[in-house]
Image: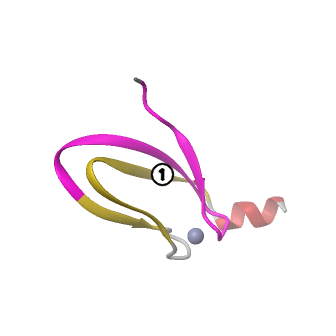
Amino acid sequence: MGLRHLTVQCQCGAAYERREVRIPIRDIGSFDCTDCGARIEIWSGKMVPLFVRVKTPEDTRRRA
Ligand SMILES: [Zn+2]
């Protein structure tokens, strides 16, 4: 099974590339949009998501 890649779009226009990584111990955490603070995801377990921002709200506005 390969890495699952997908792009998550926030309501503010920011976009994040999401990957999952397996960690050796259970983790509980959450990720909030770094631009608007909206909750993107909450996780609990050994598969935790990593988010890399690929688009800022400014990028979206410029293109619109
Ligand atoms: Zn946002």
Instruction: Name the image quarter holding residue 61.
Output: bottom right
* Ligand 1: image quarter: bottom right
Q: Please, is residue 33 above or below residue 43 in the view? A: below
Q: Indicate left or right for 52 with 23 as reference.
A: right
**In this rendering, is residue 37 above or below 4?**
below
Residue 28: x and y in percent read 25, 61
Farthest residue in the front direction?
Answer: 44
The magenta segment is 2-27
Q: Quadrant of the N terminus?
A: top left
Image quadrant containing the C terminus? bottom right
Q: Provide the major secondary structure of the magenta segment.
A: strand
Between 39 and 63, the residue placed more toward the observer is: 39
- At label 1, counting other C-alpha atoms closer than 10 Å, the crowd grade (few under 14, some 14-19, many 20 or more) is few
Of 23 and 59, the residue lying toward us: 23
Is 36 positioned to the left or the right of 29 in the image?
A: right
Q: Residue at x 48, y 47 (%)?
A: 18
Q: Nearer the viewer, residue 15 or 26?
A: 26
* 46 relative to 33, above or below: above
Residue lying at the far left of the rendered structure = 25
Residue 15 location (% of width, % of height): 60, 56
The verdict on residue 18 being magenta is yes
Residue under the point 60% across and 64% down: 10
- Magenta segment includes 54: no
**Spot occupied by residue 20 in the image (x, y as percentages of width and height):** 38, 42
Identity, as a three-letter code, of the amino acid under mark 1: Val
For residue 30, side relative to residue 4 (left or right): left
Question: Dot 1 corresponds to which residue?
Answer: 52
Q: Secondary structure at mark 1?
A: strand
Indicate left or right for 19 with 25 as reference: right
**Based on the displayed image, in which of its 4 quarters is residue 63 positioned?**
bottom right
Dot 1 beta carbon under 8 Å from ligand 1: no
